[in-house]
Image (tube, coloured by chain):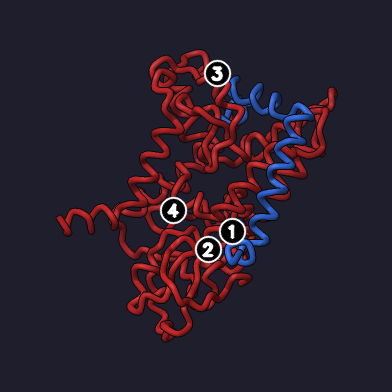
Chain colours: A red, B blue
């Protein structure tokens, strides 16, 4: 019994990811018929990068929705979607990335495939990790607001040129099920498919390259990590600074120094690896801890 | 009380989030989100 419980606990995150992805993309008829869900649930933004054109999607992608509102003629700021983003960020921080994002799940599963010389970070990581902020500002905010057609309508530039989640969960299943869409394929789909293929191959070698370097949603949630209701704490009376947490972290974050780094997706590997039980989170019931890093 | 003290910033952000959501609904942004999401997004699937 204890063995089964330990196994379940060790794989809890994968199960939560699978269940949440299945639930939030539960419109099975869409995959069969090659169309999408058109109900009122799509008023609601999901916490992860979950394309609303995925045949199964029951909710909306926050990044796609944010761009749609900015790109429409009538609005210069998307209060509604920003409300969802701030809410998810303030409650969960990047826990949403680690536990609730369908494209994060895909990358996690790919990284489990054996591959020679796996590495934690790409060369140039020190600078590359800021690319997601450039994408957030450039492709999600500035371009949809400023590049307009003759009627004053913008476009969702991140979805159009970058988003691999849209290609994987929406483009491929919809195009496969709709011959008229196949006839319309052009350079844009080729570019997006190539980007997706590159990220899939990279994910075999490096842990979650899209989340670490490109995802604008992760960039937003990461800013909330230090203040979110769900945070990590290091008990300085127990921590010996052995560095085991950093060695176990697939993003190489020195958790004992920066438990609430904007890059942390709350996978919990560091907590399990700590030989002294010094890392806990704000929802745990351990008493007598000295919280540090609340603002780091 | 301790919970409120330790989570001031998060709670303030949640209040702001709720206000933003209300403003967004009042301005009709939720309709824009719904309208976009119930139609196939050609940009998202690589055809737009």
State the residue at coordinates (42%, 80%): A243
Q: Which residue is mark 1?
A: A228
Q: Which numbered mark, 4 or 1, is in the foreground of this view? A: 1
Q: Which residue is mark 2?
A: A231
State the residue at coordinates (58%, 69%): A126
Q: Which residue is mark 3?
A: A38
Q: Which residue is mark 4?
A: A202
Alpha carbon distance from label 4 to label 1: 30 Å
| Mark 2 Cα-neighbour bin, 10 Å: few <14, some 14–19, many ≥20 | many
State the residue at coordinates (64%, 66%): B5
Q: Earlier in the sequence, mark 2 or mark 4?
A: 4
Alpha carbon distance from label 3 to label 1: 33 Å
Protein chain holding label 4: A
> Looking at the picture, how far across and down is residue A91, in whole percent?
57, 52
Q: Which image quadrant: the N terminus of chain A? A: bottom left
Q: Secondary structure at mark 1?
A: loop
Do discs 2 and 4 belong to a common subunit? yes
Q: Earlier in the sequence, mark 4 or mark 1?
A: 4
> Looking at the picture, how far across and down is residue B17, in whole percent?
69, 45
Alpha carbon distance from label 3 to label 2: 36 Å
Residue A189, compared with residue A105, is above or below; it is: above
Do discs 2 and 1 belong to a common subunit? yes
């Amino acid at each position: 019994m204890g063995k089964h419980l330990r196994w379940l606990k060790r794989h809890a995150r994968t199960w939560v990811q699978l269940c949440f992805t299945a639930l939030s993309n539960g419109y099975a008829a869409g995959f069969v018929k090659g169309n999408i869900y058109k109900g009122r649930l799509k008023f609601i933004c999901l916490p992860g990068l979950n394309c609303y054109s995925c045949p199964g999607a029951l909710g909306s992608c926050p990044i796609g929705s944010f761009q749609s509102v900015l790109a429409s003629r009538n609005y210069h700021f998307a209060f509604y979607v920003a409300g969802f983003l701030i809410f998810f960020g303030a409650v969960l921080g990047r826990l949403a990335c680690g536990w609730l994002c369908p494209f994060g799940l895909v990358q996690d599963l790919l990284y489990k495939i054996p591959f020679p010389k796996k590495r934690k970070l790409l060369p140039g990581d020190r600078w590359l990790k800021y690319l997601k902020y450039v994408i957030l500002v450039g492709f999600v905010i500035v371009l949809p607001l400023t590049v307009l057609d003759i009627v004053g309508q913008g476009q969702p530039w991140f979805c159009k040129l970058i988003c691999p989640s849209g290609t994987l969960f929406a483009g491929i299943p919809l195009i496969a099920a709709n011959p008229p869409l196949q006839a319309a394929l052009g350079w844009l789909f080729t570019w997006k498919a190539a980007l997706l293929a590159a990220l899939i191959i990279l994910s075999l070698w490096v842990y979650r390259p899209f989340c670490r370097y490109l995802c604008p949603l992760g960039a937003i949630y990461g800013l909330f990590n230090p203040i979110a209701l769900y945070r990590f704490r290091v008990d300085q009376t127990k921590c010996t600074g052995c560095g085991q947490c950093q060695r176990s972290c697939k993003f190489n974050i020195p958790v004992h120094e920066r438990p609430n780094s904007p890059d942390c997706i709350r996978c919990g590997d560091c907590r399990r690896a700590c030989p002294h039980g010094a890392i806990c989170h704000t929802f745990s019931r351990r008493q007598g801890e000295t919280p540090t890093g609340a603002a780091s | 009380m301790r919970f409120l003290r330790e989570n001031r910033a998060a709670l303030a952000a949640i209040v702001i989030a709720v206000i933003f959501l209300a403003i967004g609904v009042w301005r009709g942004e939720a309709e824009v989100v719904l309208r976009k999401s119930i139609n196939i997004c050609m940009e998202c699937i690589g055809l737009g």
